[in-house]
Amino acid sequence: MFKKIAQTLLVILILVSAVFYYFDRKMHGRKSHSPVEQEFVVTSGQGVNQISGRLQEQGLISNSLYFDLYIWRIGREEKIVTGAYTLRPNMTIPEIVDILTTGKNLAPKDIKITIIEGWSNKKIAQYLTEKNILSAEEFKKETGAVEKYQEQYSFLQDLEPKKDTLEGFLFPDTYLIYPDSTPAMVISKFLNNFDKKLTDTMRQDIQASGHSIKEVVIMASIIEREVRDPKDQKIVSGLFWNRLQDRHPLQSCATINYILGNNKEKLSYEDTRIQSPYNTYLNKGLPPGPISNPGINALMAAIYPQESDYYYFLNKPDGEIIYSRTIDEHKVNKDKYGL
């Protein structure tokens, strides 16, 4: 009797040992020999089951159960560090657990940047340089490679390669930029956003207006630098389009400041005499290119101007816009407000 019990216990021990050995092998195994790196993100609030399930879904481990058993066996289920990791299928479960519970091999965090409405390419280049994302030289070279992007983005078709740049089309917004991004990756983020913001309806309405997308962006870039309030932007848009139709110079102070490279509140007579195709005091029509990168409100204003009988306007230091219908009324307002 005792002998039979001993034999039965031996069999059970062997079976248990075999099961432990099997699971130990599985827990220390690897999904494959593939060295291809993958990004794996652990967010706050995720439990072990969720993480192991996603590891299995991404093909980084063969079975979530083995991951769960291992991490619970070593008592590190509460030690997982949130963040973005670079993992490979040829890693073992202990290696992956070690990485996730110590924060090793965390991928570099994306850099958050904010491009402000009305910034020129020069200002964006300076900003990206300060953020250690691109050098000014890299930025200038990439934004000058118009032809490179025209195949992908239809809204750039009106631009002239080797003459125009991508100024005006780098959509102002907040972005997350990967630290090792190439110049093309950074510029593509801006252009992708512009492509998304300029809806099919907006494109159709631009075509129906008889203007090109380039012309609308140039107008929007001027409006963006002239007035900030969306309501005023629509009024000024109507005013400017009327001037163009009447073959009257736009006389935009913003275009002069673009030439000067600053933001003078009050221009001198000599400033308005500067010889440049961007001088809208001397030249009729739109300047040859955008003077800033406009946001959605300025773009909408350029596409959908508000009709009015105004023909002139003044910017007060507090942001208020003073409109005039005639040149005489405009002169009176200039004297009245000292502008």
Image (spheres, grey):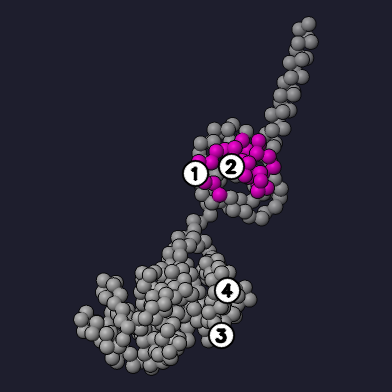
Secondary structure of the residue carrying numbered label 1: loop
Residue name at image x 50 percent, y 81 percent: 215
Rate crowding at label 3 as few (under 14), some (14 to 19) or many (20 or more) other CA atoms within 10 Å. Answer: few
Tag 3 near tag 4, CB within 8 Å: no
**Other residues around mark 4 within 10 Å, as few (<14) / some (14–19) / many (≥20):** few
Position of 203 relative to 23 (above/below): below
Name the residue beneath numbered marker 3.
160
**Residue sitting at x 70%, y 52%:** 34
Quick one: quadrant of the N terminus?
Answer: top right
Q: Residue 204 got which mark? A: 4
> N-terminal of the two: label 1 or label 3?
1
Q: Nearer the viewer, mark 2 or mark 4?
A: 4
Q: Amino acid at mark 1?
A: Ser
Residue at the spot 74% in from the left edge and 24% down from the top edge: 15
Mark 2–mark 1 Cα distance, whole angstroms, equals 11 Å
Q: Earlier in the sequence, mark 3 or mark 2?
A: 2
Amino acid type at circle 4 is: Gln
Q: Position of residue 87 (x, y in %)?
A: 61, 50
Mark 1–mark 4 distance (CA, rounded to whole Å) = 44 Å
Of badges 1 and 3, the one in the foreground is: 3
Name the secondary structure under disc 2.
helix
Give 325 or 207, whichever is nearer the viewer: 325
Residue 276 visible within the image: no
Give the magenta-colored segment's residue range.
41-68
Extreme residue in the top direction: 1
Question: Residue 51 got which mark?
Answer: 2
Can residue 58 be seen here? The reply is: yes
Query: Between marks 3 and 2, how big is the CA–CA gap?
Result: 50 Å
- Residue 192 in picture, x, y percent from top left: 55, 67
State how far apart marks 1 and 3 are (Cα). Answer: 48 Å
Rounded to the nearest whole Å, what is the CA distance between mark 2 and mark 4? 46 Å
Cα separation, mark 3 vs mark 4, equals 22 Å
